[in-house]
Amino acid sequence: MPLLTAESLEHEVKFARRLAVGRGPENDLVIEDPRVSTAHALLAFEGARLRVMDLNSRNGTYVDGIRIGRWVDLVEGSELRFGPAGPFHLRETNGRRRKASTTVGATVAASEVDQGAVSTRLMLYSKDLANGTIVVEQAGQRFRYDGSMRFLLLYILAAELLEEPEATPRPNRGWVADDRLRIKLWGLHGADRRDPSALGKLIHDTRAMMRRKGIEAGFIQKKNGATRLDLLQGQVELHTP
């Protein structure tokens, strides 16, 4: 069952088949912010696919930094913003107990939900500076992909994680500022020429690619202005020629 979290707002909401988002009291997720529309967005399942659609809101709905209009597929770890509200992150629940609520910016009732972490191992085999093989092992599944930009994205994030002192608290570990990440991906001049949404699209496409193969890609985490791999250092391997 999906869980939508907003850590900066100390907020979580669990839902089964659909989630209506907006400022109006009739919504499942009520965000009490005048910049959020009365009926702002809708999350709903289409078969096994979880999708989100903006409901012609004034300030827009964003998935991984990209403003959307029609239905867009979501994967675990997707970052959502409803106008200025967020970021919210999509999680799957299965195991540990934690609190959930259903309203942002108001007194809320809390309930218990389940959430569990999936054991993941990420191995990156570099062929040259910008190409290589991605291997992910997770819950008996094995994903392998040969590529360039998606590989480079993961390689940069993995290298940052492995350089962190082991004493760094996990919530603070491995974050790479998006401006620096864009420069590492496309170079100083190339980053300036790229569309501002290019990084968000690359992250979204990388997660979606894994999800299609049965891999939960929530370990690729996004927050306002930064990206990281939410893994332990022992779960990541970098291999160079």
Image (spheres, helix red, strand yellow):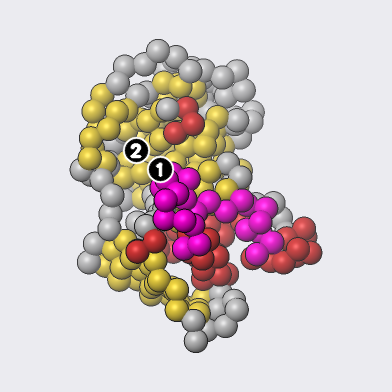
Q: Amino acid at mark 1?
A: Leu
Q: Is residue 177 magenta?
A: yes
Q: Is residue 38 above or below residue 187?
A: above
Numbered range of the magenta stretch: 162-184
Q: Is residue 220 above or below residue 225?
A: below
> Residue 58, located in which quarter of the rendered image?
top right
Q: Residue at x 30, y 21 (%)?
A: 110
Q: Amino acid at mark 2?
A: Leu
- Quickly name the residue at label 2: 3
Q: Is residue 197 above or below residue 22?
A: below
> Residue 59, located in which quarter of the rendered image?
top right
Q: Is residue 90 left or right of residue 80?
A: left
Q: Residue at x 69, y 66 (%)?
A: 186
- Quickly name the residue at label 1: 90
Question: Looking at the image, do the residues carrying marks 2 and 1 touch, with CB atoms under 8 Å apart?
Answer: yes
The residues bearing labels 2 and 1 have C-alpha atoms spaced at a distance of 6 Å
Q: Position of residue 88 (x, y in %)?
A: 47, 37
Q: Secondary structure at mark 1?
A: strand
Which of the pair 179/61 is nearer the observer?
179
Q: Quick check: can you spot residue 205? A: no
Q: Position of residue 56 (x, y in %)?
A: 59, 32
Q: Position of residue 196 (x, y in %)?
A: 69, 51
Q: Is residue 58 left or right of residue 87?
A: right
Q: Quick check: can you spot residue 50? A: yes
- Which quadrant: the N terminus? top left
The numbered mark, 2 or 1, whose residue comes first in the sequence reads 2
